Image (cartoon, grey):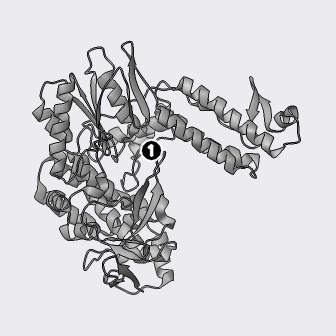
Amino acid sequence: MGQVFHSNEGGIPVKVCHSTTPQGEKHTDEELTRQWNSIDWEKVRSDVNRLQARIAKATQERKWNLVKRFSYLLTHSHSAKLLAVRIVTQNKGKRTPGVDGELWTTASTKMRAALRLTEKQYRAQPLRRVYIPKPGKTTKRPISIPTMYDRAMQALYAQALQPIAETTADPRSFGFRLFRCAQDASRYAFTCLMSQGSAPWILEGDIKGCFDAIAHDWLRENIPMDRSVMTQFLKAGFVFETALYPTDKGTPQGGLISPLLANMTLDGMEKILAARLPKMNVHFVRYADDFLVTAPTKEIAEEARDILREFLAERGLELSEEKTVITHIDDGFDFLGYNFRKYKGTLLVKPSQKSIKVISEKIAAIVRKAQAWTQDHLILALNSVIRGWSNYHRHNAAKRTFGFLDRYVWAVTWKWGKHRHPNKGHKWIARRYWHPEGNRNWVFRTEENTLLLFEDATIRRHTIPRLNANPYLDRNYFLERRERMKRQTPWVQTSRSFFALPPDNRVVERMSVLR
């Protein structure tokens, strides 16, 4: 059934309904459940990945007619539709409905959705707009939530667009990329700045409202994707407090395909700098909409800023005047939660003060919330935060910061114990919650769980992947790298969910021998 929302202009009723896609053959829930449960997902992934590799190869060879043909085959294949439905029903947003309130929770609904997934007469529904707070800021970030059907359509077309994006991307772009992460960007920035002869001036760039400001006309003209489907994604509008608002620009944050479109919009920044500033010792590194440009002089950094400002203007974007600054390496700068600064000619990368403040406040908030929790519950909640933050920063000079945060955690947990037992003495509280373990006498633990220390994370130098390697064409390289990283850092995310890359038995066998 459709829902009625009111437009923000005049309060005109607007009918919102499901896409009128053909249903195909009628199936009972029992039949659909049996079909879904009997799917060979290894074969599905293999089929999808085979077409993705052909798209990547055709893109590399600049055979755009073949790219268009293979993309059509992929977006109309049964395997890709099955995988698209599986993606949206297994990711973090699977329990968050769109404006229609629909969720795909059963095998029959998933199978039925895959069978009716088509671009014929496709009409995207408006997105449900919510606002979430930005860390450390009073402003809020707008998040637009598509319906399950629209998410599946985005996942379907993202499977065809991802190989193109990976092949045409700037080599030193690390955000929203397969098998790349923030640690890669940090390590590459360190490599560009570490030596005595490195360029000392840094342009810290930030694009103002990147996702929300991209020009739709530029996307339709330059992104190799079905224009009618893309128009539906871009022009769907959003609903906030029962009012329907149009979307005249930008790609909404919250959509599966939005990071891809944003990345492809920004690709070319590195190439234009290399063309306009050749042999100038200028280096570029980007993570999503945050980027750095190293330059030998302040004047060249300013010139790079003007070049990029012109580049972005063609796409409807502009640099943030507040966040785009030029700094000297001796003064230091923050990037992706890290602080880069040279001390007497030696470059050190540490956790930024802002990042330390955010994690401290998060730990304090958990402990305040846990006044009535059991010790086990508190330990599990803190361990999740400690493990994630320490693993993110373990590749840099963070040992002193880890020690500081361990002392901070001890202080807030001691305060927690005193608050729970105001009439008990210090020795009693210590014996109840802290116990000896190995060489340590003060271990916050129970019989089942032990509180982790930040210092438990071993400082390990991070290695970046080959910048010219393509995940779809250099398959074995990334499989071997993924297995190697899993052994060293099991926590690291090495792929995105819509990347169909099943294990290669030969590689797995080889890696098992190496173990």
Report the residue marked by disc 1: 493
**x, y (%) of residue 303?**
16, 32
Q: Give the side of residue 409 with respect to residue 225, left or right.
A: right
**x, y (%) of residue 249?**
24, 62
Using the image as rendered, state which of residue 120 and residue 452 is in the foreground: 452
Element carrying mark 1: loop
| Residue 472 position (above or below residue 346) | below
Does residue 50 appear in the picture of this structure? no
Using the image as rendered, state which of residue 448 and residue 418 is in the foreground: 418
- In which quadrant of the rendered image does the N terminus lie? bottom left
**x, y (%) of residue 300?**
17, 27
Q: Residues within 10 Å of mark 1 (few under 14, many from 20)?
A: some
Residue most toward the front? Answer: 10
Query: What amino acid is found at the position of numbered circle 1 in the picture?
Result: Gln
Q: Give the side of residue 183 with respect to residue 68, left or right.
A: right
Splitting the image into 4 quarters, where does residue 67 fall?
A: bottom left
Look at 72% across and 42% down and name the residue there.
449
Look at 40% across and 47% down and name the residue there.
495
